[in-house]
Image: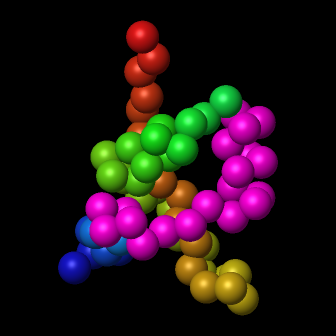
Amino acid sequence: MTDQQRIQRAVRAGRYVFTDHAVEEAQADNLRFSDIVGILLQGEIDSVYTDDPRGERYVVFAAMAYW
């Protein structure tokens, strides 16, 4: 299973939390939590940061359309 598949499986199962920092950043960028969940489910891993003492971090990218 790829990292992306593992992330998507966790999101589908509801095994995720939004940190206070994530909430602040989402609000600053006018993102809804449903937007973030959609990005995690439909997007692609853009990069992986392995040097964080808290564990690996992923940047997930997805194009979004607003109408």
Stretch of the chain drawn in magenta: 11-29
Residue sitting at 41 percent across and 21 percent down?
65
Residue 15, above or below 23: below
Foreground of the two, 42 or 24: 24
Q: Residue furthest left?
A: 1
**Given the current orientation, which residue lies at the most extreme bottom position?**
53
Is residue 39 among the parts visible in the rendering?
Answer: no
Query: Residue at the front extreme?
Result: 14
> Would you say residue 23 is visible in this rendering?
yes
27 falls in the magenta region: yes
Is 20 part of what is drawn in magenta?
yes
Say which quadrant the N terminus sits in. Answer: bottom left
Residue that appears at 75% across and 60% down: 20
Residue 45 in the image: above or below residue 29: below
Residue pictured at 60% horizontal, 35% vertical: 31
Residue 66 in the image: above or below residue 43: above
Quadrant of the rendered image containing residue 3: bottom left
